Image (cartoon, rainbow, N blue to C red):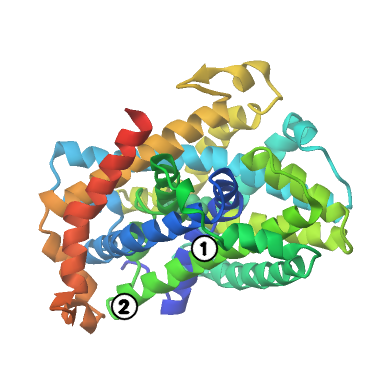
Amino acid sequence: MRENFSSKLGFILTAAGSAVGLGNICRFPYGVNENGGAAFLLVYLFCVIIIGFPFMWLEIGLGRMTGKGMSAAFEKTGANWFFKLNPLLALIISFIILSYYSVIAGWCLGYLGLSLVDKHEDFGNFVSNANYTVPSALAFILLVVWIVRSGVKAGIERASKIMMPLLFVILIGMAIYSLSLPNAYKGVEFLFHVDFSKITPNLLVSAFGQALFSLSLGIGGLTIYGSYLSKKDNIVSISFWVILMDTLVALLAGLIIFPAVFSFGISPKSELAFTFNVLPEIFSSMPYGYVLSVLFFLLLALAALTSGISFFEILVGNITDKSQISRKKVSYLLGIFVALLAIPSALSTGANAWFSSVSLFGKSGFLDILDHTFGTVLFIVSAAMTSIYVGWFMPTKEVAEEISVGCSMFAKPLFLGVSLYKVFIFSVKFIIPILIAFVFAQKFL
Ligand code: PFF
């Protein structure tokens, strides 16, 4: 018998745990900063609404309909050899992203440890020291394996139910504090005052990629979770809560970071240096800086952990779907491979000259190359293939019918005779693939 989530709330917190991650707290504020503030936020919200909702219904619906992760679900619904490559691609992407995501998550654990002993380490020194980066990445992987091997209910759901509320408490507390700083309003203005002239095709590409990544859509993370969801539950309302939480966390992260940045007049450098260098510097000059620093890195570590679990469950869930090997064995074995691949990334930020300087596709350093190739380009390719497959190569209606189960309003006309059912079919067939094609053309042609 397939394990199920014990409650709707458990599912929502776990799926939101997957969505809320380093993407929200590091990548989103940086995207806002790089792309001229609120214009980025506006386009991001547009992508979340237009793409996020139907794609999330699709992923969860496909999982619940087949009771399987993406690999077995594609087989069960009759995918040809070409589309069967997509779940394989998604597994490779999850495996590779997890390997370097663990390195960055390891930095969070490392900085958390340093904050706890009230020590500040320069970012450059920290990341180029293998004695910091390797053990901290391995510690993160160990935590992920330890949680996922215990199963969906006892491991993943239980961990999310503890970690997500804690994450929200820290976020809200820190945002209130940050908003009370002198000149905080300048940061708020930057985040919410839209300058329409800043909306460019490039901005659309970044915002679109960020929306997909942030909502964990494209590589079957929510398909595997959906396969453990009960038929009673309402996929539409669940998706609403997950998307709301993910967006709120991104906004709250912005409300912590920008008021603090403007209050101290510091300008952010790069995405990661921003999080690990600039913020600790700001915190250290604030009253209660020590506590703030501990809370902030705890927040990052929690967010990273619930997303790391999700990458790992894509691998473990899909493999156990198709083999007789136990969850525990698969978890341990895969954990070893992820750890092995994490080492070159952990060495690629200064500790080893070759891994730090190797360059490919215009990116230099092993971690950056993996992030560009797998975390950006192939991530979008996989999302495109999923929507084209469901939209054009299998009866899209079957997934739509599945979404209707547990949601009686889905098929009912809501406005001018249009139901969410029709919106879903139209989005999956046309809007999502066309937007993805546009993004692809902008970015890579
Ligand atoms: N949504 C996560 C973040 O914002 O960091 C990353 C992610 C997790 C993407 C799981 C995809 C996934 F399947």
Seen in the picture, residue 362 relative to 203 is either above or below; the reply is above
Q: Quadrant of residue 101?
A: top right
| Kind of residue at disc 2 | Asn
Q: Is residue 227 visible?
A: no
Q: Which image quarter is the N terminus in?
A: bottom left
Residue 328 x %, y %: 48, 53
For the image shown, how many numbered marks are present on the structure? 2
Q: Is residue 226 left or right of residue 256?
A: left
Q: Earlier in the sequence, mark 1 or mark 2?
A: 1
Q: Is residue 107 above or below residue 215?
A: above
Name the disc covering residue 17, or none: 1
Front one among 265 and 268 = 265
Q: Nearer the viewer, residue 236 or 429?
A: 429
Q: Amino acid at mark 1?
A: Gly
Q: Secondary structure at mark 2?
A: loop
Q: Is residue 35 visible?
A: yes
Residue hosting label 2: 234
- What's the CA distance linking mark 1 and mark 2? 18 Å
Q: Where residue 397 sits in the image (x, y, percent)? A: 12, 64
Position in image of residue 186 (x %, y %): 70, 60
